[in-house]
Amino acid sequence: MKIKNTIKMFISLGLLPTFIVSASCNEVKEIPKEKETNEKPVEIVSEPSKDLEPDKGLNGSTNTGGKQSEVPSETPSQKPGNDDKETSGQLNSEPTNEEKPNTNGQSNSNQTKEVDFTSLEPLELNPTSYIKFYNQKHSDAAWIELKKNFNSLISELNISQEIKNEFNLELVEINEVSTNKVEGVINNIKIKFTKDNQSVIKVFSLNGFAKYNDTKVNHKNNFLTQNELNESLTNLFPSLVARMMLYSEKPNEYLSNTSQNNFIINFEALMNRNNDLFTSKSPNFNSALKETFFSKNPEFETKYVYKIVAAKYNDLTGTLGLEVFISDSDENPSDEPGINKQFIFSGFRRINKEKPNDNVLSFFMTPSNLKELLKKNTSIKNKIIELKNNNELPINLNSHLSELSLKLLESNLYSNLLISIIDNKGSYNLRHSDLRVPSLVGLTQEFGLYPFYTRYKKDDIIKNLNVSIKYDNNRNQKMIEASFNVRLSIAIQESYNNLVDNFITEEYIEIPVIVQTPLDTFEQ
């Protein structure tokens, strides 16, 4: 009865429809639990209308949401089969499932299904090239072109348009591809097929390219003829010429081996006939110097180019070996492979071990400079003053000096030794009279290039140092004398090398040096 009265009250207030809806909602909320457990929310949300076909994405994958995916229009360079432009090595670059928004509120793990790759099983993994542009070339030349054009590569591998529509395609592990010119095949081409963030890799071998015949004449062998060299070159030491020629070809490769201190003779200082170091008779060190060594066959002059890639030398025998690489010019590519050829040139300047003073380079020191060095060395100075009045001459001061004092003197001699260049053949010419040994160290590890390649090692260059007090009959006075040898390694490189690094041999030349200064200048 109370319920009826209440209904009447709501009718009078115009609220009965609202009440009826609420009652209806109360009935919906009372869904039996059994029915609730059997329902699957994913299926209810994602199931498309039976009257409509699902929208297809760029890869042919189905869009299960109620809204069609927005995919950028396919540009001409992305279309399969468009060979006019180079591609990036990937087709159908649709975002992966991880990148797509989750429109149905469910987790990605619930949506992931195992991809069916059975459509790839019929693929021929050893197809034959059918495009003449490629199969008329050797496999290595063809691969250079194919890896630049992914669409052409996919066509050559006979991968159908249906597969291209179904999967993302990508060339992977490109560095593992190998070519066999003799068999005319490109091996180990790996294509990755991806769909719904799952992928497989298929490995192809592409056959049918022109086979390389070893008996075929390579005209590059007849491109260069060795020239007779003139004295402007042969008056120089071969070790200097070899290193300057390689530096001229690729200067940046030798920067790490170049000393950058001021007032030194390095690669840069020797370029373009430095008049402070050479006479006008000497050659110009630049990239054109190689033209002096070779003549080109006019028949192939526009077809081929060459560069110096390695050298060897022997300053004892005066020989120079050059290795050149001959290749096609950019304007005239061919199927002929590039070749390396080696040439030996003789008649260069040689180191004379028997006459050490006849090797262009010599060293000296002024008497005043020697006096300063001896006075700075306190132990030597005191010993000289102590023995100054001893008339039992000559006196060998070495026996009165410590090893440490002599080592210190050797180091100071190295830093203060002056350089002299005397060339009776008129190619080398040193205009500066005050250059010291450290100025010759133009390379790292205490190596130098001028006048020949050698090492000026500070703690190993002064040999057989002897300090003594002698009587000089010509001057009629007592003298302090320092005599020693400057030991330098002789440049011998027996195998072809790019000469970026430094090399030392066990052959040496020892150049004698004698310096005197008056004893009476040493006082208490």
Image: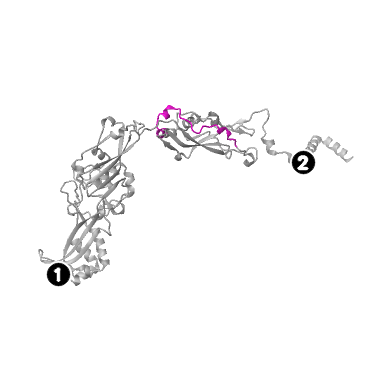
Where is 259 relative to 306, above or below? below
Q: Tell me residue 31's x, y (percent).
A: 77, 39
Q: Which residue is mark 1?
A: 393
- The kind of secondary structure element at disc 2 is helix
Q: Is residue 82 left or right of residue 497?
A: right
Please report the residue visible at 44 percent of the width from the left and 35 percent of the height from the top.
186
Q: Tell me residue 189's x, y (percent).
A: 47, 36
Please report the residue visible at 19 percent of the width from the left and 72 percent of the height from the top.
386
In primary-sequence order, the first of circles 2 and 1 is: 2
What amino acid does circle 2 point to?
Glu
Q: Is residue 17 visible?
A: yes
Q: Is residue 63 left or right of residue 514?
A: right
Q: Which residue is mark 2?
A: 34
Identify the image quadrant of the N terminus.
top right
Image quadrant where residue 195 sits: top right
- The kind of secondary structure element at disc 1 is loop
Total numbered badges shown on the rendered structure: 2
